[in-house]
Image: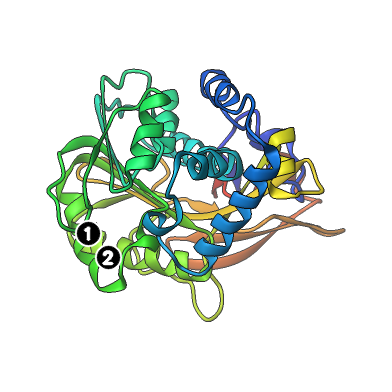
């Protein structure tokens, strides 16, 4: 019998066709950002945000896009809520997979303004040392204003400090394809316990994660998530593994992005591995798409140790259906 094992207030209050809603930013971070925005032209923020979005879509790196404090502020308003929500969700998934993992040191590699550092600190309050690296001085200056001290380093050329937890969030897309595999090996070498990689939930983003997964397993890493197994990735053709995080938009966020709805859905792909730990969900199954509710029951698209599976949970099987009717995209189930 299938049973949902990822039970929290967000995942179990949503119907299968809905997505869980994540609070945008922790209060201290929101207060700091609000203070910086006092007296700043929202029209200028919107124009800068549009230019940044266009540049990123054209595959330009942060070094050529974020060239002033004003650019960083526009980036924070437009992108910080979504990237924070994703990083926080992934950190929580790792915490659920290895509940005895209590990192003391963090390396936020290519961490920009410190988004993943904030997410990790909220998830693991016992962190005592945060080491942020980035090549962009404007991001580093902003990270310092937000309470995260960083060091200017080029991820490809410069040495990296080691840490219990290493996170590279939305970083690989900015690295030349030929340098990505060596960088992944370098990040893993800096990891004393857990490595987390997050990329946009697009086909190219997933391919970077899939390549990283294969390389890390080849180096003996244990997969913590989202995969519940270490078998070859079963995705084929035009399909790709990704997830979606819904978050509320603030008034500034709506104005800066020219949005028409009060929420945003950020899609992402990720992988977390450990040098020694085994995930609590190993051997189970991950829900890879919004469950489909129909008259016969709920159909779940699952990634299992045996491959991909579309599994129908019939309404007539009342116990199983009751346990899974509120299952969400991204949850882990056992059978």
> Is residue 187 in view from this perspective?
yes
Distance between mark 2 and mark 1 Cα atoms: 5 Å
Q: Specify whether 115 is left or right of 274.
A: right
Verify CB contact (< 8 Å) between mark 2 and mark 1: yes
Q: Which residue is mark 1?
A: 183
Image-quadrant location for residue 45: top right
Above or below: residue 330 compared with residue 295:
above
Badge 2: residue crowd in 10 Å (few <14, some 14–19, many ≥20): some
Picture layout, residue 281 above or below residue 64: above
- Crowd rating for badge 1 (residues with CA inside 10 Å; few <14, some 14–19, many 20+): some
Label 2 residue SS? helix
From the viewer's perspective, is 164 left or right of 171?
A: left
Residue at image point 44% right, 50% down = 66
Residue 135, given in percent of the width and then of the height, sits at 28, 48
Q: Secondary structure at mark 1?
A: helix
Where residue 146 sits, quadrant-wise, is top left
279 sits to left or right of 22: left
Q: Position of residue 264 (x, y in %)?
A: 69, 46
- What residue occupies the far right of the structure in this picture? 295
Q: Which residue is identified by label 2?
A: 180
């Amino acid at each position: 019998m299938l049973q949902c094992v990822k039970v929290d207030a967000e995942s179990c209050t949503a119907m299968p066709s809905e997505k869980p809603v994540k609070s945008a930013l922790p209060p201290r971070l929101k207060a700091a950002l609000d203070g910086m925005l006092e007296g700043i032209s929202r029209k200028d923020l919107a124009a800068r945000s549009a230019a940044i979005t266009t540049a990123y879509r054209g595959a330009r790196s942060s070094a050529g896009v974020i060239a002033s404090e004003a650019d960083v502020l526009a980036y924070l308003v437009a992108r910080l809520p979504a990237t924070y929500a994703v990083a926080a969700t992934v950190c929580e998934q790792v915490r659920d997979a290895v509940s005895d993992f209590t990192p003391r040191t963090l390396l936020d590699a290519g961490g920009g303004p410190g988004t993943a550092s904030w997410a990790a600190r909220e998830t693991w309050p016992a962190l005592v040392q945060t080491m942020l690296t980035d090549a962009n001085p404007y991001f580093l200056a902003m990270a310092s204003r937000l309470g995260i001290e960083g060091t200017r380093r080029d991820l490809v050329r410069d040495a990296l400090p080691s840490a219990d937890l290493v996170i590279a969030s939305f970083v690989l897309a900015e690295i030349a394809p030929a340098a990505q595999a060596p960088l992944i090996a370098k990040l893993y070498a800096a990891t004393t316990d857990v490595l987390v990689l997050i990329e946009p939930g697009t086909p190219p983003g997933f391919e970077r994660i899939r390549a990283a997964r294969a390389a890390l397993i080849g180096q003996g890493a244990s997969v913590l998530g989202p995969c519940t197994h270490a078998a070859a990735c079963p995705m084929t053709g035009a399909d790709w593994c990704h997830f979606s995080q819904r978050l509320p938009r603030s008034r500034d966020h709506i104005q800066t992005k020219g949005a028409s709805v009060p929420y945003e859905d950020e899609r992402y792909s990720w992988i977390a591995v450990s040098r020694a730990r085994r995930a609590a969900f190993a051997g189970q199954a991950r829900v890879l798409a919004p469950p489909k509710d129909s008259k016969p029951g709920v159909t779940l698209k699952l990634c299992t140790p045996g491959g991909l599976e579309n599994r129908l949970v019939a309404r007539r099987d009342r116990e199983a259906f009751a346990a899974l009717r509120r299952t969400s995209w991204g949850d882990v189930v056992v059978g």
